[in-house]
Structures are given as structure tokens and as C-alpha cells.
Amino acid sequence: MEQRAYDDQRATRERADAEARLAAERRAADQRLDDERAHIEKLRQRERQQDSATRLLVRIADLLPLMKLVPNVVRTNRVPGAVRTPRFPHYSGPLLDEPTVVCERAVDGLRFGGFADLPGLHDTRATEQYRTLAHLVLTAARNEYRHKNEADQQAQQEHSELVALDLWRYATFVRLSLEHLIEQGESLDPGEGGEGVSFPVLNRRPGDKSLWFPPSVPQGWDEAVTRDPNDPQYRAAK
């Protein structure tokens, strides 16, 4: 009788142990499945991030060679994109050359291109950098950066050239930041400039001819500015 009771107790313990092991195995299997799903989702998010950043880089690359044309490229007294061509010989508004039209389209591409791709970055800093660039470019293109008392034609021209250089430099920094995001999964921190500003101030003080540069100079910056003929720091290859 006592042996039977002992056997029953042992069988009960063994069943409980088996059930506990089975439950633990199930929990471990569920955890592995969750981990695998999380890993796959992380990889997919990283791929979306790289794809989105690459498409935004294309928008920037389309505009960089045309940056000198950006200031005041959007004319408010004509039909957007209107240009006299053999197809439209009777157009009587302001004439535009082809680079100006291409520049306008590149500005629009930069402005509207981010709508679809910015959410895929999953990087708040990179997103804000691109939005800042688009805002600066649009401000310059619409001629909304000048001092009201800036009447001298030569001063206006010099101001426009400095603004174009600042835009080119900031666009170059955003390009480097997106490239770093693609390669390392993290955007670049530009640091804080004067008065905590980490981007160019287009409405500069009269006589201020300094050019913008990131307070925290990233790797690749010197190479970028010294290899472009548009930048004052350009150095020819030897």
C-alpha cells in the first residue's frame, strides 16, 4: 500500500516536471520566434531607411550643380515653368533659359520629394536636417531672405552668391549625414554654431561675408569642399 502511494507521488512529480519542462520549452520557442520576427523587422526597417536616404540623396544631387541659380529662381510674375519654345512661340512672359527651368524643377523635387521618403528614415535628426535644407532652398528661391533696405545691385548680387554658397555647403553636409546614415545607421551631429544655430542664416548682416560650416566638422567635409570648384576652399588636383 505504501509502495503504491509512493509510486503515485513519484508519477505525479514526474508529470509535473515534464509539464514544466514542456512549458519552458514552449516559452523559449515563443521567445525565439519573437526575437526572429523582431530581427527581420529591424532588417526590413534598415533596408527601408537606406532606400529612403538614397532617394533623398538623389534629390540633393540633382540640385547641387544648380545651386548658384537657386536665389530668386522662382518668379512670382509668370506662369511657373513657362518658357518660350518652338512649341509655345507666343509666350510673352519673362524668358527663361533651360538651366533655370531645370533648377526650378530640382527645387520642387527637393521640396516635395521628402514627403514620401522622410518617414522611412526613422532618424529624427536626419529628417529635420533635410526639412531645414528644403526650407532654406525655398526661402532663397522665393527671394525671401534679403534685407528690405538692400537696394544696391552689386550688394544684392554678392548677397545672392554668398547665399548660394551657404546652401551648397549645407546641402553638402546633409548629403554627408545621409551617407553616414546609410553606412552606419546614424546621422551626423552638426553641433551648434553662433546662438545655437546649426544651419546657415540666409538673412546675414550687411558686410558679413563669412561662409557657413558645421561647428562639428564631420569626416569627409574637407574633401567635399576642397574638391568642388564652386567653393572658395577648392584646391586643384596635383
Image: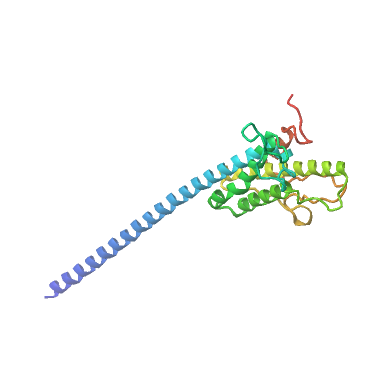
Query: Where's residue 129, x and y in %?
Result: 65, 50
Q: Residue furthest front?
A: 90
Residue located at (49% from left, 45% from top): 47
User: In the image shown, does 159 or 168 lie closer to the viewer?
Assistant: 159
Residue 4 position by quadrant: bottom left
The answer to whether residue 171 of the structure is visible from this angle is yes
The answer to whether any part of residue 186 appears in the image is no
Q: Nearer the viewer, residue 43 or 136?
A: 136
How far from the left and from the top, in percent, is residue 235?
Answer: 76, 30
154 left or right of 72 in image: right
**Residue at the image position 60 percent from the left and 55 percent from the top:** 124
Is residue 5 found left or right of 201 in the rendered image? left
Q: Farthest top residue?
A: 238
Residue 159, by quadrant, is top right
Q: Could you say where residue 98 lies in the image, as x and y percent from the top left?
A: 67, 34
Give the vertical position of 1 relative to 235 (above or below): below
162 left or right, relative to 65: right
Quarter the N terminus occupies:
bottom left
Give residue 140's position: percent from left, percent from top: 73, 47
Position of residue 202 relative to residue 86, above or below, is below
- How are the residues colored? rainbow
- Residue drawn 64% across and 48% down? 188
- Quick one: quadrant of the C terminus? top right
In depth, the one of 216 and 114 nearer the eye is: 114
Q: Quadrant of residue 8?
A: bottom left
In the image, farthest residue toward the bottom: 1
| Count of labels in the image | 0
